[in-house]
Amino acid sequence: MDFFKSYMDKVKAEDALKERTKRYVSERLCGSPETGAVFEAETIVRRRKHHMKKIIGIAAAAVICIGLAGGALAYYNTPVSYLSVDINPSLELGINGIGRVVRTEAFNDDGKKILEGAAVKNKSVKEAVAELVKAASEKGYIASDGSTVVSVTAESKDAKAAEELKKQGEDGVGDALKAKNILAVVYANSSDLATRTEAKELGISPGKYKVIKIMQSLDPALKASDYKDAKMTELIVRADELLKAYKSGSLTAEQQLAFKGVDAAAEKVRNANGSRNQGSETEVREQAQNKGSKTAEQEREKNQDNGKGSSSGNGKNGNAPAPSPSPVASPSPGRDETKGVGKGPSDNSAGAGNSGKSPNRS
């Protein structure tokens, strides 16, 4: 600014004009015409500090945004509850805090086969379970007679959340069975996370292990490893046999609660097997009747052939009259088909029911 003053002193002009010019330049540079403040080093430092604060603030905001985004992603990908799905394939779904599947795990080779090509991550529990059960049906793990047990076991530290999760699993199984037009026995249960930890240490799905624990409470000598590869249908029937071997008065409250769901599922398995056996007997009878009818027809044709050319005394052409065919009973109808969709009795811990539609049979 001293240079500006010395320069202005050399300019030949009226003093008033010079003064106005000085004031104008001073105002434009630092906005202080009254004090005649100059654009000095101190002002530059202040402005640099101000800009630096802005830059630091922007950088801090960026770091916070990145941190929040990373935290949100970690929250989304962290399971807070689980759902075990067991048929013979055994697998588990990890569910995050907003009800989406974010992790999957197979507990046997059959479970791995089901997970192959199954796009279940980021889906709702109901959608994921339906997808897995349909895949199990397509790979032949669900019998056509409706005797297969499909088990869903909710695992959570919160009882209310476990109940809701169990219902979503049941609904998913029902949707799959209807889509495939098949029947199965649906067994729903719930478990705490401590039981899940025990099951994983043994390499057994939590759903299977919960039923095995019921069996062990009745038969302490029973080893979990002996049932590690058993189908859920076999486990349910065996557990029901053990429960029925005890008088109801000697069962604990927990065992009585478990008995309701296990017994309902086992009863449906037995009914399905009974219907299958009845159907087999009917097929045998029908085959025998058809064979008898065919034999009678062949005998009649044979008699007609033997009678040709023989003299009967009454026939002009020498043909003997054909014998009347033997009476054949009408085939009895096959077994009745199961109709509709239903669920067996359920309680707060377990339930079982038949879902889906009866497959068409000829």
Image (cartoon, rainbow, N blue to C red):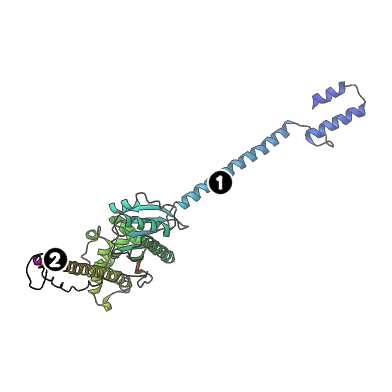
Residue type pointed to by label 2: Glu
* Residue 25 position (above or below residue 132): above
- For disc 1, the marked residue is 65
Q: Counting residues from the N terminus, which is met first, the one under dot 2 or under dot 1?
A: 1
The image shows residue 36 at horizontal and vertical percentages of 83, 34
Apparent side of residue 231 relative to residue 30 in the rendered image (left or right):
left
Q: Which residues are magenta?
A: 304-310
Residue identifier under label 2: 301
Query: In this view of the protein, can residue 48 be seen by the observer?
Result: yes
Instruction: Return the x and y of residue 34 as percentages of the image width and height.
Output: 85, 37
Asked if residue 10 is among those painted magenta in the image, a careful observer would answer no
Q: Is residue 295 left or right of residue 38?
A: left
Report which quarter residue 26 is drawn in.
Answer: top right
Res 144 → quadrant? bottom left
- Look at label 1 and name its amino acid: Cys
Closer-to-camera residue (202/177): 177
* Residue at the image position 53 percent from the left and 48 percent from the top: 68
Q: Is disc 2 placed on a helix, strand or loop?
A: helix
Residue 180 x %, y %: 36, 60
Please identify the quadrant where the C terminus is shown. bottom left
Q: How many marks?
A: 2
x%, y% of residue 357? Answer: 35, 66
Residues 37 and 50: in front is 50
Q: Nearer the viewer, residue 314 or 325?
A: 314
From the viewer's perspective, is residue 161 above or below residue 117? below
Could you say whether the residue bearing mark 1 is in a helix, strand or loop? helix
